[in-house]
Every structure is written in structure tokens, then in C-alpha cells.
Image (cartoon, grey):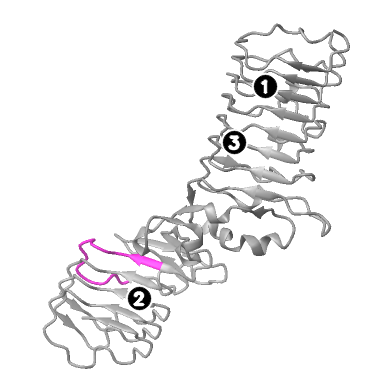
């Protein structure tokens, strides 16, 4: 059968095909072996000089390397196997001519630059176990039009991981699908809120299913833990910190340094990408007084559910960015004069469920921006 061009052996019970069995079929252009029980494809296709289309999906293949296929192959279907890695031992991604690659419904865990042929236009890697995409994975893929990453295990996605070569104004931007992943929306993922703006620079793809992206928020106290991306705010994309000193700060080596952020002992602290949100959570930590080193740039402070009989004067002075202060349920009996002095941005003050019996009238002086007071 030297002139055979198309061979269909799909949906049989083939578990083994001998190496070299197709070598005499030098004219063959398309082979279907999908729907069998093959575990090994070594020595079957690499020597076929005209093979353009290969379907080996829905088998039991565990190991794959691009060295197993001829370089001129254009369409490769690997879906529904047990492949854990798109191997490329000889780094031949620039020599391959694959246009369509379907590796969906496998056990892939990572993608890197050598995982994807440089000529690839359509890439299906949905429904795998992908947890990491290396920076620069798509940086040399000039022909990409669509990448399906739906339904994987991606909790983080570095913006550099989906960086593309510069796309001309006369070309459509590649379309990426990332829904169905357990995205952990910390401060490093804030770019998702700007993804359409970023794509106008034409070095990143369009995210087509942004409405299907669901976030796990790192600090659920400010809302539900798992929410649709489109219902989140950038201020909810937080990262924890213990200490931080801004680059322009010149007193980082000293204890008394206003531009150094140190999380108080026994508290948890979080910030967003720009530090416009700075949360200090000392809730229910058995504090008997306000910590002395609450960061100067704190915007929200939780001191509720503690045991603080009285609030000392000037303890919060200098916290000019503080907008919300929670002191409820802390057994407070007395508020000293000027306790809240200097809180020029304070909008919400929670003093409810305490043991305060009397207010003198001076407690809330100069809180010109206060909008909500809970007693």
C-alpha cells in the first residue's frame, strides 16, 4: 500500500502497534488511531515524510515527546490520554510545523516555551491539571490565534506567562480562555482587572471568558471568599506582609520610621498592589491596649473582640489614611480625650457592643470625614 494516503484504525481495541509498521507507507498524509487502548507510540510516525494529520486521542498514552512525530505534521490530536508532559527533549519547537494541537483532557501540570510549537495557531490544553505556566511560554508563538486553558488548576497566572510577540494592528489579538480555574486573587493578580486595557498594548491576548473567571479572595472578612471576578474590586486583591519599607524611605534602619510598615505582634496585615489598601487585623487576639506600632498608612484596622478597658489619648495620631476603625465588642469602658486625634480620613468608627456608659462630647472632635458612627 505504498500509495495509501489516509488510514483509519479508530475505535478498535488496539493496545499495541509494532514499531515501523507504517514506514513503507511513504505517501500517507492522515492517520486515525483514536479510540483504542494504545500506551506507547514510539517508533510509529517519526519516519513518515508526508504525514500532516494525526489523531491518537482517546487512548491510554502516558508518555509523549515531539521527537515521536515528523516535523512537517500540521494537526495533532492527543486529547483524552494520560499524558503528564508535552516533552521536547531535543528542543525542536522552532522546527515543528504544527498548526493545531489538541492536548485537552490529559494530566498536564506545566506549560513552558518548549511545550508549544512556534507555529501553533490553535492550542487546546483545557481540562488538564496545569498549575504553572512559565514566563515567556508564548513569547515566540507568532501565529497564535486561540489558547484554551479552561478547567485547569491555575491558582496564579503571571502576566509575563501570557506575554506575546508584538501583534500588528492589522492582526487580531489571540483569544485566551482561562475560566474554570481556582484563581487566587492576591495582589499579584490585580492585572485581571486591567486586562482589556493591557491588551491594547498588543503584547497580551484578549481574555474572552473574563465573565467565567472566579476568584478566591485572600482576605474573606471583607466579603465572600469565592466570588466572580467581575464582582470584585482591586482593593480586595491583597497580599499579606510582616514588614515593608518603600524604596524612597530613608529611615528603614531605625525603629521610629513612619514610612516603614511593620505588622504589630499578634496581628495579620494585608496590602493591595499599590498599597492604597492597607489592612491591619488584630481582631480577637486578646489585646489589652491598642498596639503602638500600627502602620502609619493603615486604611482599615480591626481591633474588635479584644479586652481594652480604655482608649488612650493620641494612640492613633498620625494615621492620616485610616478610613475604617473597628473597636466593637472589646469591653471598652472609657475613651480619653484626643483618642482619635489626627484621623482626618476616618469614615467609619465602630464602638458598638462595648461597656461605655458616658461620653463627654470631645471624643469625636475633628473627625470631619466621619460618615458612620456605631455606638
> Closer to the camera: disc 1 or disc 3?
1
Left or right: where does residue 18 sit relative to residue 51? left
* Residue 293 visible somewhere in the drawing: no
> Closer to the camera: disc 2 or disc 1?
1
Residue position for label 3: 110
Secondary structure mostly seen in magenta is loop
Residue position for label 2: 324
Q: Mark 3: few, some, or many residues within 10 Å (few <14, many ≥20)?
A: some
The N terminus - image quarter: top right
CB under 8 Å between discs 2 and 3: no
Which residue is found at the position 68% from the left and 8% from the top?
Answer: 17
| Of the pair 247 and 187, the residue shown nearer to us | 187
Q: Secondary structure at mark 3?
A: strand
Q: CA distance from mark 1 to mark 3?
A: 21 Å
The part of the chain drawn in magenta is 279-293
Quadrant of the rendered image containing residue 332:
bottom left
Q: Secondary structure at mark 2?
A: strand
How many discs mark residues in the rendered view?
3
Query: Looking at the image, is 310 positioned above or below residue 106?
Result: below
Residue position for label 1: 56
Which residue is found at the position 57% from the left and 58% from the top?
Answer: 192
Quadrant of the rendered image containing residue 29:
top right
* Residue 334 visible somewhere in the drawing: yes
- 292 magenta-colored: yes
Q: Position of residue 339 (x, y in %)?
A: 27, 83
CB under 8 Å between discs 2 and 1: no
Amino acid at each position: 500500500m505504498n500509495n495509501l494516503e489516509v488510514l483509519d484504525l479508530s475505535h478498535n481495541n488496539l493496545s499495541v502497534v509494532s514499531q515501523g509498521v507504517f514506514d513503507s507507507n511513504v505517501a500517507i498524509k492522515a492517520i486515525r488511531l483514536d479510540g483504542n487502548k494504545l500506551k506507547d507510540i514510539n517508533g510509529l510516525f517519526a519516519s513518515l515524510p508526508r504525514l500532516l494529520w494525526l489523531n491518537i486521542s482517546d487512548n491510554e498514552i502516558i508518555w509523549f515527546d515531539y521527537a515521536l512525530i515528523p516535523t512537517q505534521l500540521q494537526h495533532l490530536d492527543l486529547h483524552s490520554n494520560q499524558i503528564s508532559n508535552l516533552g521536547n527533549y531535543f528542543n525542536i519547537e522552532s522546527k515543528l510545523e504544527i498548526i493545531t494541537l489538541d492536548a485537552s483532557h490529559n494530566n498536564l501540570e506545566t506549560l513552558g516555551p518548549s511545550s508549544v510549537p512556534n507555529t501553533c495557531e490553535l492550542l487546546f490544553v483545557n481540562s488538564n491539571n496545569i498549575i504553572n505556566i512559565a514566563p515567556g511560554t508564548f513569547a515566540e508563538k507568532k501565529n497564535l490565534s486561540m489558547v484554551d486553558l479552561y478547567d485547569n488548576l491555575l491558582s496564579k497566572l503571571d502576566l509575563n506567562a501570557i506575554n506575546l510577540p508584538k501583534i500588528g494592528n492589522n492582526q487580531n489579538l489571540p483569544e485566551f480562555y482561562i475560566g474554570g480555574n481556582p484563581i487566587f486573587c492576591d495582589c499579584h493578580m490585580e492585572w485581571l482587572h486591567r486586562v482589556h486595557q493591557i491588551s491594547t498594548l498588543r503584547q497580551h491576548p484578549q481574555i474572552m471568558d473574563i465573565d467565567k473567571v472566579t476568584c478566591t479572595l485572600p482576605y474573606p472578612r471583607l466579603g465572600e471568599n469565592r466570588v466572580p471576578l467581575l464582582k470584585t474590586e482591586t482593593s480586595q486583591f491583597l497580599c499579606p506582609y510582616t514588614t515593608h519599607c518603600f524604596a524612597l524611605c530613608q529611615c528603614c534602619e531605625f525603629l521610629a520610621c513612619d514610612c516603614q510598615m511593620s505588622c504589630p505582634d499578634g496581628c495579620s496585615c494585608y496590602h493591595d498592589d499599590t498599597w492604597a489598601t492597607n489592612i491591619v487585623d488584630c481582631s480577637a487576639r486578646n489585646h489589652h491596649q491598642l498596639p503602638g506600632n500600627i502602620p502609619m498608612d493603615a486604611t482599615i484596622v480591626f481591633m474588635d473582640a479584644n479586652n481594652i478597658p480604655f482608649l488612650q489619648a493620641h494612640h492613633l495620631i498620625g494615621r492620616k489614611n485610616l478610613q475604617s476603625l473597628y473597636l466593637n465588642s472589646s469591653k471598652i469602658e472609657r475613651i480619653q480625650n484626643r483618642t482619635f486625634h489626627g484621623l482626618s480620613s476616618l469614615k467609619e468608627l465602630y464602638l458598638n457592643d462595648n461597656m461605655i456608659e458616658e461620653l463627654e462630647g470631645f471624643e469625636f472632635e475633628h473627625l470631619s470625614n466621619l460618615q458612620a458612627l456605631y455606638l
